Image (cartoon, rainbow, N blue to C red):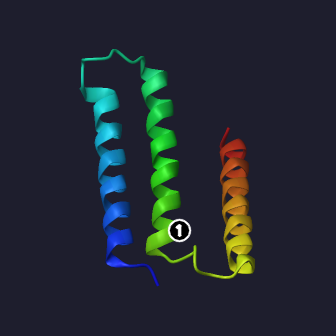
Amino acid sequence: MASIRTYSIIYVALLLLGTAQFALFEVDLIEFGYWTALTGVLLFSVAKILLVAGYFQHLIEEPRSITYMMVSALFMVLLLTIAAGFSIQ
């Protein structure tokens, strides 16, 4: 089981990633294009998803077979989403 220190570090990392997502669109110190900012937000979102799934949902401590099952389930959901997007067009 993870310690309170680990949870605190992950929480601060999530807070910083969320602040960076906001800053990409709102702070005018560095001018980002829309697509650059959107790509940054998506990358930060993936990092936040991995931190939450790994530490707060304890996937880090689970056997590898459960992790592989979660990855295959994610792949199937993405595949179904893409297929649904093509069927709408």
At x 36% / y 54%, what residue is drawn?
A: 13
- Amino acid type of the residue that numbered disc 1 sits on in the rendered structure: Gly
For residue 68, side relative to residue 29 (left or right):
right
At x 73% / y 54%, what residue is drawn?
A: 79
Q: Position of residue 51 (x, y in %)?
A: 48, 61
Query: Which picture quadrant has residue 14?
Result: bottom left
Q: Position of residue 25 (x, y in %)?
A: 31, 28
Q: Which SS class for mark 1?
A: helix
Q: Position of residue 40 (x, y in %)?
A: 47, 33
For residue 19, side relative to residue 83 (left or right):
left
At x 72% / y 59%, what residue is drawn?
A: 75
Taking depth in this image into account, of 80 and 74 the one nearest to the observer is: 74
The residue where tag 1 is placed is: 54
Number of numbered labels in the structure image:
1
Q: Is residue 57 above or below residue 37?
A: below
For residue 57, side relative to residue 21 (left or right):
right
Taking depth in this image into account, of 2 and 62 the one nearest to the observer is: 2
Taking depth in this image into account, of 82 and 37 the one nearest to the observer is: 37
Q: Quadrant of the C terminus?
A: top right
Query: Which picture quadrant has residue 88?
Result: top right
Taking depth in this image into account, of 71 and 7 the one nearest to the observer is: 7
How crowded is the residue under tag 1: few (<14 C-alpha within 10 Å), some, or many (20+)? some
Query: Which picture quadrant has residue 64?
Result: bottom right
